[in-house]
Amino acid sequence: MNRSILFDSPFLLGFEHTRSLVERAAKAAAESYPPYNVEDRGDGSLRITLAVAGFSPDQLEVTVEDRQLVVSGKRDAGGRPEESFLHRGIAARGFIRTFVLADGMVVEGAVLEHGLLHIDLGRPEPETRVVKVPIRTAP
């Protein structure tokens, strides 16, 4: 992967985390299987829908690792041999699809329905916190 010249500037100190996020997002954008939709559901919530026809719930895994949503599917090694197909147009390979999450985004749940995996994300309102700072007098 090419390094971004923008983040290599000596005037941008401490932006290594931002560079890492950009590189992870670029890597995720290069993935093409399985196809997916991202839907804005209002109020800061999103729904990611992945087309995972042929996968059962026990073959799918949804995890969050370091603000990165990772969806993976693993196919069983068993099954019918390749020779039994006259045409194979439905992909039968495993996958790993990643999405970089913004600060505060949480995974609310995942549902497998009719070959589509729906993952709901939310951004809860931050808790309002008021801290009273004591005022001291100078001696």
Image: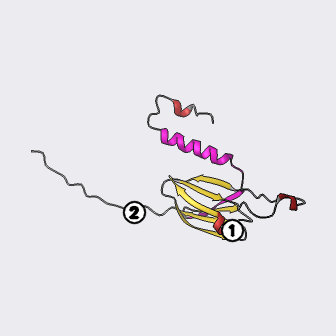
Q: Position of residue 91 (x, y in %)?
A: 78, 57
- Report the number of discs: 2
Q: Which SS class for mark 2?
A: loop
Of the image marks 1 and 2, the number of the one nearer the N terminus: 1
Question: Of all residues shown, which one is farthest toward the top?
Answer: 10
Q: Disc 1 vs disc 2: which is toward the camera?
A: 1
Q: Residues within 10 Å of mark 1 (few under 14, many from 20)?
A: few
Q: Position of residue 88 (x, y in %)?
A: 85, 58
Residue 80 shown left or right of residue 129 in the figure:
right
Residue 35 shown left or right of residue 89 in the figure:
left
Q: Which SS class for mark 1?
A: loop
Q: Quadrant of residue 78?
A: bottom right
Residue 82 shown left or right of residue 115 in the figure:
right
Front one among 37 and 32: 32
Q: Which residue appears at 48% of the width and 38% of the height?
A: 16
Q: Which residue is mark 1?
A: 56
* Residue 73: image tag: none
Up/down of 1 relative to 71, above or below? above
- Check residue 30 for magenta coloring: yes
Q: CA distance from mark 1 to mark 2?
A: 38 Å
Q: Which residue appears at 55% of the width and 33% of the height?
A: 6
Q: Which residue appears at 54% of the width and 45% of the height?
A: 21
What range is drawn magenta here? 15-42
- Check residue 136 for magenta coloring: no
Q: Which residue appears at 63% of the width and 58% of the height?
A: 72
Amino acid type, label 2:
Glu
Q: Quadrant of residue 128?
A: bottom left
* Residue 127: image tag: 2
Residue 46 shown left or right of residue 133 in the figure:
right
Q: Quarter of the image for the N terminus: give it.
A: top right
